[in-house]
Structure formats: C-alpha cells, structure tokens
Amino acid sequence: MRTDFAFGKTGLSVDLPEGPNYRVLETRWAQPSADETSMLEAALDRPFGCPPIREMAAGRHSAAISVCDITRPAPNRRTLPPLLARLEAAGIPKSRTTILIATGLHRQATESEIVEILGPEIAASYPVVNHNARELADHRELGVTKSGTPVFVDRRFVDAGLRITLGFIEQHLMAGFSGGRKLIAPGLAYQETIKNLHSPRFMRHPRAVEGSIEENPLHQELLEIAGMAGHDFVFDVVLSEGRKIAAAFAGEPRQAHAEGIAFVRASTTQWIPERVDAAITSAAGYPLDLTFYQGVKGVTAASHIVKPGGIILLMAACDEGAGAHEFSRLMREFPDPRAFLETISNTPVTIDQWQLEKLAMVVASHRVWWYTPGLPAEYHPTVWGKLFPSAAGALQALRAELGSGAQVAVLPEGPYVFARPLSAQPEPVLA
C-alpha cells in the first residue's frame, strides 16, 4: 500500500507493510472558493460586527498589519492586496502602513523570506519589520491581565492608528485554533509575556489543546491581551486543498474569528469509531516541518486518536535541525521526560520549554517514534522515543511491534487532519 506523506518540500512516498489494518485519514478540506478575489473583497466590504475596513480606515493617521512568519503557510500574497488597496483608498499612504512579521520567539525572517511571505512588490513598497520579542525597547507596557500575565506588545502595532491582523484558521496545539488574537500574542509580544502564556498553568490545562476554545484558559488570555493592544480588525481565511482559499472572515476580531472557527469545525472534523493502536503521521511538510520544534505538532495532533500506550510514528524532514537555541539546549539536557516535567514545574519559565512540555505530556501516555533525517546526531541520544535512520525501517519496526490486525491510522498531512474518536463528540443539547 503506497502512501504519499507531506514531507519537506518534495514529499515522501512509502510502502506500508502488510499486516495492520490501515485507516488513511486524508485531510478533510473545505471546498475552495469558486471566485477567490470576489470572496476576499466581499469579506472586507461586508465584515462581521463592524463597518467595512475602508470606512474604519478613513481619518486614521496610520495602520499596522501583523502577518504570519515563514513557519506558517498563510496566503499573504493573495489576502494583502485587497486589504492594502482599501487602506490606501481611505487615505493611509503606503509609507504609513507598517507590515509586521509576527515572529513571536521564532527567528527573524530573512530578506528572501520576507519576499516569499509578502511578494516582491509589497515587500519593496511598504515598511516591513521583523518583530523582536527579545528587545524590550520595541514594546509598549500595557498592564497585567486578570490572571497576572504582564502584557508588552510591539509598539509599532500598539501606536498605529488602525491595528489589523492577517492570518488563517486551523487547529493549534495549545490555543485551540490559530488566527486572530495569536497574531498579537504571542506573535508581537515581548518574551516575558510569551513565557507567561506558555507556563505550565496554561500548557497542562486539559482544555489547552487542538480544537478547543471552550473553557480554554489560554484562548481567553489571548483574547484579553489582544483587547488591551487595541486590536481593531481581523482578516482571517480558511485554507482548502492545495492552499487555495475556502472562506474569509473579516471584521470585529472576536466575532469574525469565532465565525471562522465554527466554519473550520463544521467543514473539517472527522469522527472515527474508536481510538487506534498506532498512527503514522507527518508534520505537514514545508514550511511546517523545517524544525523538530514544529514537528511536535504532528505528534500532539495524532495523540487524540491513539490509545494510551499506543505508538505515534512521526516523519518530518527537519531540514533546519532542532529549532532555536533555547529549545535545542533543553533537548540535549533532558533525556528523561518525567524529569523535565518535574524540573519546569518548580523553576521560572524558559523560552521554548512549552513545545517540549507538550511533547512530554504525550510521551507520558504514548510511545513516540521518529523519522527525522534533518535532526543532527548530537540530539539523537536524548530524543524521547525510538529514532530511525529510514522511513522503511521505521515502518517495518512498527509492523513487527504491532503484529497483524492492529488498527493503524495514517495521516499523510499530520496536523491538518482534524480527527477525533466518536467518544469525544459533545453531548447533544436537550431542549
């Protein structure tokens, strides 16, 4: 049974060994728009809960637009032009419309990546800046959230006359769904704010997982911070197969984002009869599997459908290695996930510990196997789980471990598969 996995820039074709009962879970995509241009323009001109963006921009002295960095496949080249045209028509010149690359604590985007993110014409025509979470002087102090998070957000966003976020909505391993408020925090937040948002009090909450916003304390915290930063307008899209655009949601940030989430849930959720014995998954290919750090999302997404004690095999290119230096250091220093969880429970939050914390929580209940050829050898001794030098070897080992008849889910696009067992369906609301 030959299967193609999203892997790096080129993909990975593998033969699944006979024996297990494979259930291929292809990404359930929303249908692409028949007229993408008209759909995007209609979203901007008939937004949710607020006037059209051109009316909102009238009389404003400047605008700031927060966009995803290179690790997210946001279709900025298609969503930015109609938005920028309306801002300019409303009287905000290009020179006073700043585009911020919402890096969070990721590395800065290079010049070539900025062109890839925005397109050459926009990159050359507008002020474009990388957010730098490690530079306090670049941020405004906005106070403290109700739960105690100190809030610092990029001053170039906060000080703008009109504050806009541009993103896309998919499930997210901590915040439930991406888009909206995430383009402000962590996207444009100072490192101390980001560290608080990724502390164990949020990361270990049972509702701070993929697909969850109800009673998700991190989602609520992000909404509060976005409000403090003066978030005026959101322009989010939902992607379909081939990264075409299925739908657009623009307007008042909370309402438009909530409408987008409802659309994603209705159009992409897959329900399977019960949890499986194992899952073979990916990190959805380039640019999401550039690093081991990002590859963790493929593991956490699959954990929702694998039985406790079951195996999750992740195949990710990791062409840029482990990730940022803080994450890389933690990987090398903690060969035992239990010791890692115990240590970070009693020490100040360290940058990037949260991604490893989410992985440790899965490792505590599942067996995780890896085919990550770009991960340097120095990390191999401390990877939590079995590491394989080839995809074929990993698959044969899985077959030998499980035997015939095992139920195995196959997720060619990893975190883009929004699957849950029927037992996780919400109870119907009785009249």
Image (tube, rainbow, N blue to C red):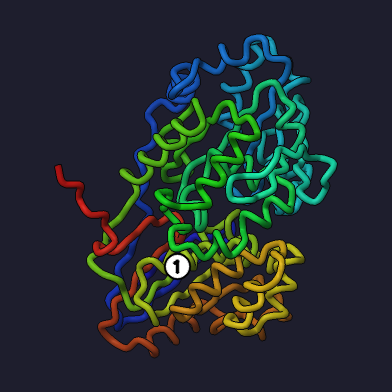
**Residue at the spot 76% in from the left edge and 66% down from the top edge:** 325
- 224 up-or-down from 105: above or below: above
Left or right: 174 as drawn, with respect to 26: right
Which quadrant is the N terminus positioned in?
bottom left
Among all residues in the image, which is located at the extreme right?
137
Residue 194 lies, in percent from the top left, at 67, 52
Residue 388 in view of the camera: no
Closer-to-camera residue (204/15): 204
Residue 313 lies, in percent from the top left, at 47, 75
- 141 up-or-down from 93: above or below: below
Residue picked out by circle 1: 281
Among all residues in the image, which is located at the extreme left?
431
**Residue at the spot 51% in from the left edge and 31% down from the top edge:** 253
Residue kind at label 1, given as amino acid type? Thr
**Residue at the spot 74% in from the left edge and 27% down from the top edge:** 159
Q: Secondary structure at mark 1?
A: strand
- 327 up-or-down from 102: above or below: below
**Residue at the spot 46% in from the left edge and 45% down from the top edge:** 242
Closer-to-camera residue (145/26): 145
Residue 54 in view of the camera: yes
Which quadrant is the C terminus positioned in?
top left
Disc 1 packing (10 Å; few <14; some 14–19; many ≥20): many
Residue 305 lies, in percent from the top left, at 35, 68
Looking at the rendering, which quadrant does residue 414 occupy?
bottom left
Closer-to-camera residue (358/41): 358
Residue 258 lies, in percent from the top left, at 42, 37
Mark count: 1
Looking at the rendering, which quadrant does residue 417 occupy?
bottom left
